[in-house]
Each structure stands twice: as structure tokens, then as C-alpha cells.
Amino acid sequence: MLILGLDPSQSTGWSLYDTAANLSAIRAGVLKAVGDDYEHKSASLGFALMKLIKTDRPDFIVIEMPIRSQPARQVRKVKFMGEEKLEEASGSGLNAVISSNQMVGACAAIIGAFNIPFECIAPVTWRKQFLGFGTRPGWQRKDWKRAVRDRCAQLKIVVTNDDMADAVGIAFAGKASQTCRMIEARAA
């Protein structure tokens, strides 16, 4: 079975995992979304994904779940010139929520047009499958990105950026999904 893993964003990581081959044979790349607004970026991502699907013909596609809601504002203590003050921490804002959902929607539409089975997977789920743990107290985004890149290096999977590495983890976790198991059972 050929599984396509997608980490949709304006720089969408993708990976192709042939479950019959060695893990080191996983191929990965990036699809760039270009345009002046969310809609045109989504359209360009959809077109690039269409070309990838036509070329490689995956049997199953796994997509990282989009951000569903704007995270609550976090407040942190900051020391400046000996004084402590409270400051709002930066993070995913409304634009990230909109962009994430637009990109996943573009992917789902193209996948649906090709009638390929797909599933959305939460980050905590694919990380648990790929890394062996889905949560770590105190870990920030950079810690997760480093852990996923390190795991790819351990498995001798060539990735050159975080988007590609995440897509590898997503495709890897797709093998354990219920949808994938059903497809394999029907094929047997």
C-alpha cells in the first residue's frame, strides 16, 4: 500500500510511504502555496497536490487535522531591566486557524475528486505512533520539530525541513489507522 502523508500549510510537507518497502525508502518533499490571499494559496496547493497524486497514485492519504479553534491567549512573566511584568505570549492566532482550515479543505477537495480514501489525524495521535509519545509537559513547538527530525534521522529517512519530517510521521501513523486497516482487509 502506498500512503501519502500531508502536513498542510503554506509550505505543505508530503511523504510517500510504501508499506512493503523499508522505512528508509520513504520519500518526502514540499508543496508551496503561492498567492496573495488564502483562496489563491489554497488553489495553488490544490493544483500542486493534483499533480503529485496523478504522478504517484497513493492508495490512502493521511492529513494532519487543521487547527479547529483559536488557542486561548497565554500570559507569561517577562523580566525587563529588573522589573517583572505580564505579557501576552505570541502563538497561533486567527490567521493560523483560517489558513490551516483553507489548506486542509483544498487538500480534501482534491483527494475527494480522485476518490481516494483519506483520514485526518490529530498531531498528538501521529506523534504517539511515530515518536512513542504524544504529549510532553513543557515541550514547545521547536521541541516537537526537533524530536521528529531526530526520529527521521534515526530511521535514515531523508528530510530537509520540519514540514517534510512532520509529513513522514503523519504517513507512518496512517498505517495504524482504522481506515488503512479496512482498505488492507478489502484488498486481501
Image: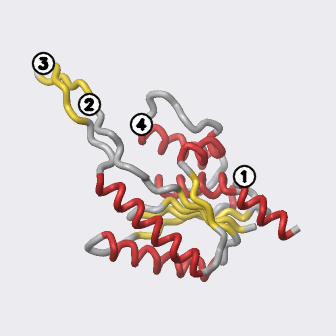
For the residue marked with disc 1, what is the amino acid? Ala
Task: Report how far apart the C-alphas of labels 3 and 1 lie in the structure.
Answer: 51 Å
Say the numbered circle drawn on residue 176.
Answer: 1
For the residue marked with disc 2, what is the amino acid? Val
**Vertical order, 46 against 72 (above or below):** below
Say the numbered circle drawn on residue 83.
Answer: 3
Q: Nearer the viewer, residue 98 or 148?
A: 98
| Mark closer to the chain start, 2 or 3 | 2
Q: Mark 2 near mark 3, Cβ–Cβ under 8 Å?
A: no
Q: In terms of secondary structure, where does tag 4 sit?
A: loop
Residue at 33% from the left image edge and 48% from the top image edge: 92
| Mark closer to the chain start, 4 or 3 | 3
Q: Quadrant of residue 18?
A: bottom right
Which residue is denoted by mark 4 in the rendering?
140
For the residue marked with disc 4, what is the amino acid? Gln
Please tell me how crowded label 1 is: few (under 14), some (14-19), or many (20+) other residues with Cα within 10 Å: few
Task: Report how far apart the C-alphas of labels 2 and 1 lie in the structure.
Answer: 38 Å
